[in-house]
Image: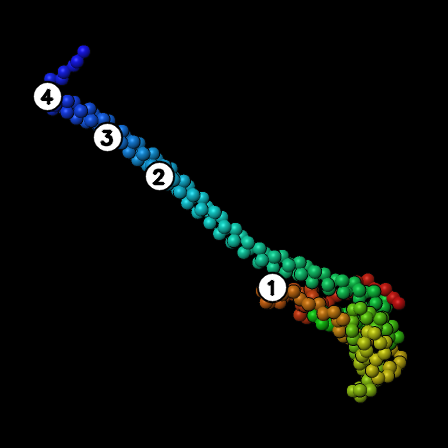
Amino acid sequence: MIKINLLPSYVLERQVVRRLAMIFAVLLAFVIVASVAWRLQRGMALASLQNQLAITKITENLVISNETRAKEELAKIDPINTKVKFIEDVMNYNMKAPALYDELSRYTYEKVRYRSIALSETQMEIEAYAPSISDAGRYLLNLYRANDLFSQVTMSNVPGYNDTTSGNQTPGTFTGRARVARGRGVMIIRPARAGGFDFKVTCVLAQPLGAPSYGGAAAAGAPGTPGAPGAMPGMAPPMRGT
C-alpha cells in the first residue's frame, strides 16, 4: 500500500519546529533549575563556611586571649620565686644569730657573765664580766678553740696586761687568731680587783653572716637580729665551763 503525502512541506516544518521548541524549552528549564539549585547549594556552602570562619575567629580570639593570660601568669613566676627565695633566705638568715649564740655558749666559761653582745655582718663585740684574770684567761682560751666560729679574737680592757706594741700598761689588749692560742705582748698576772672587772672581746667571724637582699637592696635587720645596728643587751644562753 502506497501512502502519498499531499500536505505542503511547510506543515511538516512547523511540526519539526514545534518539537524542537519544546525540546529547547525543556532544556532551558532544566538549565535554569540546575543553575538555581547550584547557586542555592553554593550559597548554603558559603554560609556554612562563613559560619565556620566566624567560629574559628572566636576560637582564635579565645586562644590568643588564653595565650596572653598564660604569658602574664608565667611572667609572675620569676617575681614570686624571687620573693619566695628572699623569704627563705631571710628565715635562714634569722636563724644564724641564734645558732651563733648557741655555739658561743659552748665556749663560754661558766664564771664569765655577758653585759652585752653586738653582732654585725663580720664580727661580734662582747662586753663581759669576769671575777678574776684567770677566769678571763680561761674564757679567752676557749674562744681561741672556736676556730669554726671566729678567725680572730681580740680581748681588751684587761687590767694588768702590758701591751708591748702600744705601750699601754693597763688596761691592755690581747689579740690572737682562733687557730693559734697565743697573742701579742706579754700577759702580766696581777691580783684581781675586788668584785672582778669588765672587759671587751672583739671576734671576727670566720664566715660573714651575709644579709639577704631583694631588688638590689639589703634587707634591714630588726633589733635583736643579725645585721641590726647597735648592741643587743642581755645574757647569753646557759654557759658551761671548760
Q: State the mark number for residue 214.
A: 1
Q: Classify 90 as above or below 129.
A: above
Q: Quadrant of the C terminus?
A: bottom right
Task: Please tell me which of labels 2 and 4 falls first in the chain.
Answer: 4
Seen from the viewer's position, the closer of residues 187 and 28 is: 28
Residue at image point 83% right, 67% down: 107
| 26 sits left or right of 91 in the view | left
Residue at the image position 85 percent from the left and 78 percent from the top: 182
- The image's mark for residue 132 is none
Q: Which residue is mark 4?
A: 8
Q: Are discs 2 and 1 less than 8 Å apart at CB?
A: no
Q: Secondary structure at mark 1?
A: strand
Applied colour scheme: rainbow
Task: Give left or right: position of 4 versus 140.
Answer: left
167 and 14: which is toward the camera = 14
Residue 132 falls left or right of residue 25: right
**Is disc 1 in contact with disc 4, using a CB cutoff of under 8 Å?**
no
| Local secondary structure at mark 4 | loop
Q: Residue visible at 57% across and 58% down?
A: 79
Tag 2: residue type?
Answer: Leu
Q: From the image, state whether disc 1 or disc 4 is nearer to you.
A: 4
- The label shown at residue 46 is 2
- Residue 10, position in %: x, y? 11, 24
Q: Give me the residue at 81% from left, 79% from top.
A: 175
Residue tagged by mark 3? Answer: 28
Estimate the x, y position of residue 64 in percent, counting from the top left: 46, 49
